[in-house]
Image (tube, coloured by chain):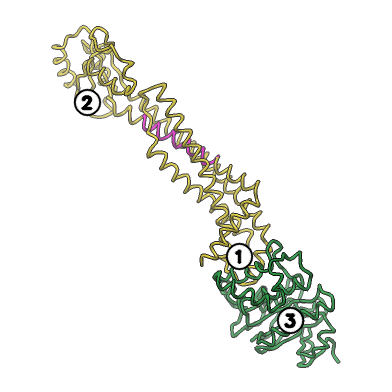
Chain colours: A yellow, B green
Amino acid sequence: MRANAWGYVFGEALRSLWRNGFMSLASVTTVAICLAVLAIILLVAVNLQYMASFVESQVEVVAFVDGSVDRAATRDLEARIEALPGVREAVFVSREAALERLKEQFGEHRDLLAGLEDPEANPLRDSFEVRLAGAQYAAAVAGELERMDGIEEVMHRQDVVDRLLAITQAVRTGGLVLVALLAAATVFIISNTIRLTVYARRHQVGIMKLVGATDGFIRWPFFLEGLMLGVLGAAVAGAAAWMGYDLVVETLTAAIPFIPILEQQPLLGNLMQLLLVLGAVIGAMGSTVSVRRFLRV
Amino acid sequence: MIEFINVSKVYGETVALLDVNCYIDASELVFLVGPSGAGKSTFTRLIYREEVPTRGAVVVDGVNVARMRRREVPFLRRKIGVVFQDFKLLPDKTVFENVAFAMLVTGASRREINRRVPEVLEMVGLADKHKAYPHQLSGGEQQRAAVARAIVNEPRILLADEPTGNLDPDTAWGIMELLLEINRLGTTMVIATHAQQIVDALGRRVIALRDGQIVRDQLQGAYHAR
């Protein structure tokens, strides 16, 4: 098509977007709600997964050394732990090293930990980070460690990881069902809006057919109107998700400095792209349904 | 230019046309007369393929439009202008835009449109009304605008379905003279009409339909058989 004809097609789409005022607003709002829900679900799911892998990447079993055991004896302890079946490696983490690590996690809030360098004040304990040959040994190794002399306490985080992964899975499945339902509703509402447009323009369409417009040419403005509704809705949802996530990240990191939460970028940029594509697809589907059923070209 | 070969058109139980045969040559002008429901509208609608015959062939410019594929129809329509009793102008567009619309949808450039539309408006006598909206025009002027739209793409055929049906006799004559002028320039023309005075005064070819059949086809005919 020539530029002239495209000008007409865009003009018509915009005009009827405006003329359908309330229905357009309703369509954009439902697209926005649907995609905002999707955005929330996705953001929660990726963060849960991130949290799970963060926890998983930490040591699988941690054994805290009894305060009465002196440093020389820990060598012997290390050898004994490494001799346990299923243990790949045991790494000794001194209380000083643990404090250093905690400072790193606190980042800019590290001054909260000031004054703890004094060995008397350091509340942390020496520990062994025990890496396993496989997750299946976790329970057995944890049991052996608990019985071992010089070990005060055993922490075993597989349960946390499992729970996080289960929650992630539930959020994902439930979310996808919800989003699918919302998407169907949105397609329906957009197709209704386009149906109104088709009705409002039936005379014009009749004349277009009469003077020899091709079916494709007749369809374009309707198709574009649906596309615009979808993309506008997606933009609204994207902007809301963007601002919302910024706010949540700021609030959470202010409250809990070392919480494992994904950085805004590139996460939000990717999310925005995904939403725009989905909005366009939903809009295009909605208008295609109506153009097929009501335009009869 | 237009040929009907054994054409029948049936809507459910109603027979609109029954075994119609006729030939209309290029540049010819034909009045289609007959009582309401005789099949005049169906006759014209078959030519621009708004309808498909139940049986038979409708050959337009060498092509049987009855067997034409859907996507070829727009290109047939660009060769045929159509004028109706109720004008069918778009109320929210000016006269210029209404006429330009017919060119726009066929992919004409802005330049072609700006050259051709004033030319056509001049020809139908609406040059000074190009900015007016349809509701600001008289019936005759609206029909002139519709004629301008029908001929703007320089069709080889012009079909008119009771073009003067909504107009007073004087205005009707004005429109008919405009159509005659367009025919003189070489456009094949089929005019379905009830305007007895005009048909009788002009003495052109008349095809009379009754109950879906051609009952009379005269080269220098009148509205009623003599």
Q: What residue span does the magenta drawing correspond to? A: A33-51
Q: Position of residue B149 (x, y in %)?
A: 67, 73
SS category of the residue bearing label 1: loop
Q: Position of residue B72 (x, y in %)?
A: 56, 74
Determine the image quadrant of residue A106: top left
Q: Position of residue B73 (x, y in %)?
A: 59, 74
The answer to whether the residues at label 3 and label 1 have Cβ atoms under 8 Å apart is no
Task: For mark 2, name the chain.
Answer: A
Graded by Cα atoms within 10 Å as few (under 14), some (14 to 19) or many (20 or more), the crowding at tag 2 reads some
Quadrant housing the C terminus of chain B: bottom right
Please report the residue visible at 39 percent of the width from the left and 31 percent of the height from the top.
A165
Graded by Cα atoms within 10 Å as few (under 14), some (14 to 19) or many (20 or more), the crowding at tag 3 reads some
Residue type, numbered disc 2: Gly
- Label 1, label 2: how far apart the Cα atoms are: 70 Å
- Label 2, label 3: how far apart the Cα atoms are: 101 Å
SS category of the residue bearing label 2: loop
**Which residue position is annotated with label 2?**
A86
Please report the residue visible at 71 percent of the width from the left and 67 percent of the height from the top.
B89
**Which residue position is annotated with label 1?**
A297
Residue type, numbered disc 1: Val
Q: Position of residue B93 (x, y in %)?
A: 68, 63
The answer to whether marks 1 and 2 sit on the same chain is yes
Is A152 in front, or is A121? A121
Task: For mark 3, name the chain.
Answer: B
**Which residue position is annotated with label 3?**
B178
SS category of the residue bearing label 3: helix
Determine the image quadrant of residue A209: bottom right
Q: Is residue A217 above or below residue A143?
A: below
Dot 1 or dot 2: first in sequence order is: 2
Determine the image quadrant of residue A295: bottom right
Front label number (3 vs 1)? 3
